[in-house]
Image (cartoon, rainbow, N blue to C red):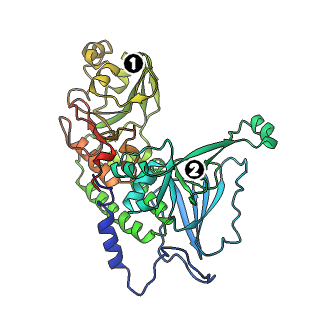
Amino acid sequence: MVFRTVKYTTAALVVAALMLPVNVAGNESGCVYSYDPSKDYFPDKVESKYGSGFEITYKGNAKFIRNTIANENYVLYQCGTPIPDSVNATPANSLQVGNWTKVAAVPGSKVVLSSAPASAIIETLGLQNTVAASYKFFTVTSACMQKQLAGLPSVDQTYATPSAKRRSVVSHGLMRRVSYDLGNEGLQWTFTTYGMNDPHSFSVNPENATDMLGKAEWIKFVAAFYNKEAEANTIFSEIESRYNALKKSAPNHTTKPSVGIARYNKVANGTIIGWTMVPAQKWLQQGLSDAGLDAYTGDMRSFTNADEFYKAVSGWDILIDTSIEPLSHGGAKIPEWQDLVDGYKLGSSSGATKSAGIKSLQFVDPNAIYRSDLISSTSNATDADEHLQIEPDVLLGDFIKLASSSSGTKKAHWYRNMPLEVPVEWMSPNNCSG
């Protein structure tokens, strides 16, 4: 296995190069050595238009990004030029909760990874050589990124509550400060998955976009930290075109098959304590709809009685399972088919459904139970948190396969058919051929 850059990046870079006139300068690839206040330092720009969860504007030598999901503001200025006078960065020792303003010089060249989607985007952009460290508990699925990170230093999180403010912090119920200890390695910043009161962390959140294509727009977000807007625009345009073409090819059922998300709840001693129905996020609702499916969008509901659970899910044609298998010594493992049989009591479902007053669970006989962990790592990471989050065209292709199959499919990219016992594709550094 090689880095996942091949799919988009090789073609994208060639197309981008052909599209740019030779006499037109693009964004800088490094620092500049003189400053012209009248110059537009970023002729290549990106915009967000699909409900990604971030907004970006450009002015002179700076980019202004609002991450509405993390509730943070980022100011990226061209390395070698001054920070704009109007910018007031939140002090590193601030106890402010949310709405931090963070400042960084771009392009990035020595960054820390603590975000699975950011890792996938960096691969897609072909910028793996800019990763200089990772958070010590951070794991990925990509075999080649696993191999790369294994040879790099790791950083830790530090926790502190300034003593002078301790009383007010406790009285207001505020958490202690959390930041990444970047040490003296010349590291620039950390890509994270949530907002932090750390001046050198930037949150990457495609999993919280409200639109399928909005997820892919986070490629543009990360590209802005590298001045790679031109490349990101080309890559996104290709994803957008493929997505729209696939959407037109989706099956047109008279009545859309219904899809629900659920999990069984098991404690470490193996006891099943209940079941939960989970509503689909907005982007998932859209993706399933575009594939000719109808997602469950009701309230999250929990059950301790199997009959009541069976009645609630009896109309589902496809089940997407999100259960975990707790281990007696701590932690958890990915469930296999027999775990689901036990967890949902499918072995006795004929008798159970009869007592519940229904004929059967519609998703059982046609082998329509799936999990999104087909590609996983031996270190407990899954590609559902990485490339799935930024490749909506491939994801839509999976949904169409689910919608088109009358007896379950084994051909999905991320979705593992459980009744057909499709095995997990376990990724380790040994799978990297690059």
Q: Which mark is residue 70?
A: 2
Disc 2 from disc 1: Cα separation: 37 Å
Give x and y (percent) for residue 289: 33, 46
Give x and y (percent) for residue 114: 50, 48
User: CB under 8 Å between callouts 2 and 1?
Assistant: no
Q: Residues within 10 Å of mark 2 (few under 14, many from 20)?
A: many
Label 2, secondary structure: give it. loop
**Amino acid, disc 2:** Ala
Instruction: From this view, report whether residue 188 is shown above or below residue 357.
Output: below
Of residues 254 and 379, the one nearer the viewer is 379
Q: Residues within 10 Å of mark 1 (few under 14, many from 20)?
A: some
Comparing labels 2 and 1, the label whose residue is closer to the camera: 2
**Amino acid, disc 1:** Glu
Mark closer to the chain start, 2 or 1: 2
- Say whether residue 254 is visible: no
The residue under label 1 is 308
Label 1, secondary structure: give it. helix
Quick check: 145 left or right of 135? left
Instruction: From this view, report whether residue 123 is shown above or below residue 302.
Output: below
Indicate the quadrant containing the C terminus: top left, top right, bottom left or bottom right. Answer: bottom left
